[in-house]
Amino acid sequence: MFPADTYIKRRKRLIDDVKSGVILFLGNDESPMNYPANPYHFRQDSSFSYFFGLDLPGLAAVIDVDQARITVFGDDVTVEDIVWTGPLPTLRENCRKIGVENTAPSAQLENILKSAVRNNRKIHFLPPYRPENILKLQRLLGVQPDQAKSRASVPLIKAVVAQRSIKSAREVEQIETALEVSYLTHTYAFKNAKPGMYEWEIVGGMDDIVHSRGMTASFPIIFTIKGQTLHNHYHGNIMQAGNIAINDSGIESPLHYASDITRTIPIGGKFTDRQKEIYRIVLDCNTKAIDACKPGIEFRAVHALVARTVLAGLKDVGLVQGDLEEAFHAHAHTLFFPHGLGHMLGLDVHDMEDLGEDYVGYTDAIKRRPEFGWAYLRLAKALEPGHIVTIEPGIYFIPELIDRWHADKKCESFINYQKLLAYKDFGGIRIEDDVLVTEDGRRLLGQPIPKTIEDVQNLSS
Ligand SMILES: [Mn+2]
């Protein structure tokens, strides 16, 4: 964990920002895979981690904002527990490391909260996403499970988002630690993905690299020759020469900060001319978007820059036609680039998605657009120094989407459907990097991972 003063300062600012009431933080519990003693790998709630740093299941914390009193609730292991768990530090010892003096057994949490409710104190909590915590809110506060998200505290959400959005030097360092391993997994995949292999052989090799450094993946690895399916977690295809494989994978640093990198691999070592044409457009989008990142620019404008670059590039290839501005306003790019350009990165890969994406990526003045494609843009607001964002343009040929648009005659004057039919077996290309917004521009985080056609082909075999 970070030094205690990091957590003390974060909590102090939270108290200043939330101003009054009682804040309840529920940590995560062990989550059973198929029976209680066989749990998934434990992952602490990221906001709990941010303010309390303790990487243990079964904890909760209450901040009485008016009295600036902070209590962490949890239970020490008994001798019977120690038979299974081995000796563990007490809650008091753990809390000393994060600058919290007051601890109490879990059983007291209910009484403390019920007395706060009786006294008409406002109880602030974040939107829960795990069923255990949804049920706890019902037991502790009488919040019905179907209302648990909507009754979350907007002032608390906004205060947490305000702090977690701006990364400190120590947090940047964590993401760079994750990126050191991303460099290794991505270069490994370039070098080792060969015709005749199953995708899972490369996934297994990447897992080895990550686990042998004591780390874990920050999300289930996407490694697929069917990259037109955006979140394709199937790894059972046999790779053939001439395929292109999308490798979208990330690492979780020791303190749980995420990296998120995508590269596209020519299986057999060489892109075809048709693949090169599309790859160049995506790479152009990636570098233009990175160069555009700076304080004050709205991310939706960077997304629009990429959408226009996709259209112009595809016009050169002959897949798009007509006036490019009209095509852009008709959303013709969303057939090829249906997702958002990127998202914030931090303790979560989609940072703070559990708090509500609109609180993270939008403002009262900048609202999410409802149209297909635009609706998936997770981040639209102006960038600020300390933001860490992903830049992940892509071009995809999704047969089902092409067929639907074609049948509906959608954007017919802007899309050359006759030519496009020949691309239905193309797959997809995505190139993703992680970028820190600085006072005077941006910094690409981590050791650069090859992405030009030349460098990628030199590395691939
Ligand atoms: Mn991403």
Image (cartoon, helix red, strand yellow):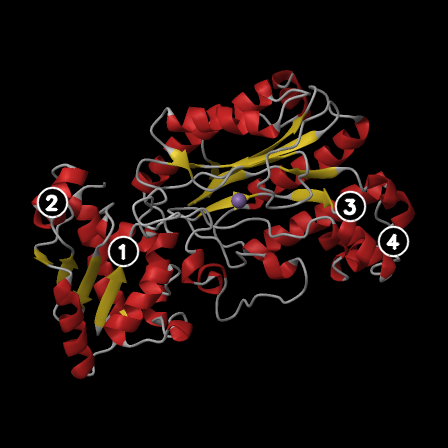
Report which residue position mark 4 lands on: 322
Say which element carries label 2.
helix
Residue 80 numbered tag: 2
Which is more N-terminal, label 4 or label 3?
Answer: 3
From the image, state whether disc 1 or disc 2 is nearer to you.
2
Marked residue nearer the N-terminal end (1 or 3): 1
User: Few, some or many C-alpha atoms within 10 Å of disc 4 (few <14, some 14-19, many ≥20)?
Assistant: few
Quick one: label 4 or label 1, which is nearer the N terminus? 1
| Quadrant location of the C terminus in the rendered image | top right
The residue carrying pointer 3 sits among few (fewer than 14), some (14 to 19) or many (20 or more) residues within 10 Å by Cα, namely: many
The mark nearer the N terminus, 2 or 3, is 2
Q: Give x and y (percent) for residue 340.
A: 60, 52
Distance in Å between CA atoms under marks 4 and 2: 74 Å
Give residue 294's position: percent from left, percent from top: 50, 47
* Cβ atoms at labels 1 and 2 below 8 Å apart: no
Residue beneath disc 3 = 312
Name the residue type under label 2: Glu
Say which residue label 1 marks. Answer: 27
